[in-house]
Image (cartoon, rainbow, N blue to C red):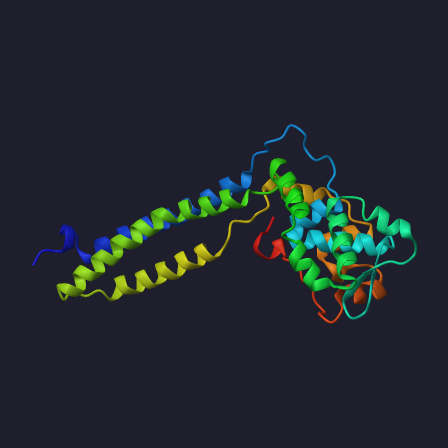
Amino acid sequence: MEDTWGMPGPTFIGIYLLGFSATLLFAFAVRIFTRTGAASTTAPIQALSAQELACLTGGPRRVVEAAVAQLVDTGQLRASRDGYLQVSQNGQHVRIRGGENPVERTIVADVARHGSRSISILTRRLAESDAVREVVARLVSAGYLVDDELAKRRKVISLVPAVVVFSAGVVRWLEGVADDRPVGWLTVLLIGSALIGFAMYRQAICPRTFEGANAVGRASVTAPAELVAAGGFTEHPDQVIRESLLGRRGSVSGENTEGSCKG
């Protein structure tokens, strides 16, 4: 009985290992290329605002957290120890002013509308607001963030060669089983390949470009809102305010880009 495709088992395993290794290199290359970024604007960001820094370090939820910290520090919002926000009653000008930028104005309007607003709910819901999307879009245009749809497409493209090689291995395995040939090593390789491929599929491409990482490294972090932008509510320098912002959660609600994105 001839070998499947005229290729002995050990030879196929060697070729499979070489081919799958090459597909992994291709996948990593696509991810690196995606993170090189490309600015689509002629107006680069000279200095990151607290909200822009928050978006780069912790994603959209961190943007809301940084804005909340700023509003609390300026007295426009009051945080209670149970993790709720209220509009400050220090003067009617607070309601009129309502924040210095779209994100802050959105937060003040939401809290004023509800009277008392849970910080965790506010952070989660307003992370999808148009005001926060504007911050994300500005960073994408500056080449500091990877466009989300582009990252998803690139991730799929990066895995196509691996799927092709894996499929060839599956076909070989099926024919080997049908011909009653030893397929023990090939079985191990296929299981290992499937696990590696699944892990890479689950791991999103880091949303921060290399230029964005450099911008974070250059950022000056001194003010309370900037400290929150860099590390979440747990980094607020005032213990009383920090405990009020954290409320009963005891942990940061915002996403952490650093957790899946080094550099």
Residue furthest toward the top?
42
Q: Is residue 18 left or right of residue 67?
A: left
Residue furthest toward the right?
91
In front of the other: 47 or 78 = 78
Q: Is residue 5 above or below residue 238?
A: above
In front of the other: 256 or 220 = 256
In front of the other: 225 or 137 = 137
Can the viewer see residue 25? no
In front of the other: 145 or 247 = 247
Residue shown at 65% from the left, 57% from the top? 125
| Percent coordinates x, y for residue 88 in the rendering | 87, 58
Q: Quadrant of the N terminus?
A: bottom left
| Percent coordinates x, y for residue 206 in the rendering | 55, 49
Q: Is residue 118 above or below residue 201?
A: below
Residue shown at 73% from the left, 62% from the top? 119
| Percent coordinates x, y for residue 86 in the rendering | 81, 61
Residue furthest toward the left?
1
Q: Is residue 213 left or right of residue 32?
A: right
| Percent coordinates x, y for residue 177 in the rendering | 18, 65
Residue 251: quadrant of the picture: bottom right
Q: How many marks?
A: 0
Can the viewer see residue 114? yes
Residue shown at 70% from the left, 59% from the top? 122
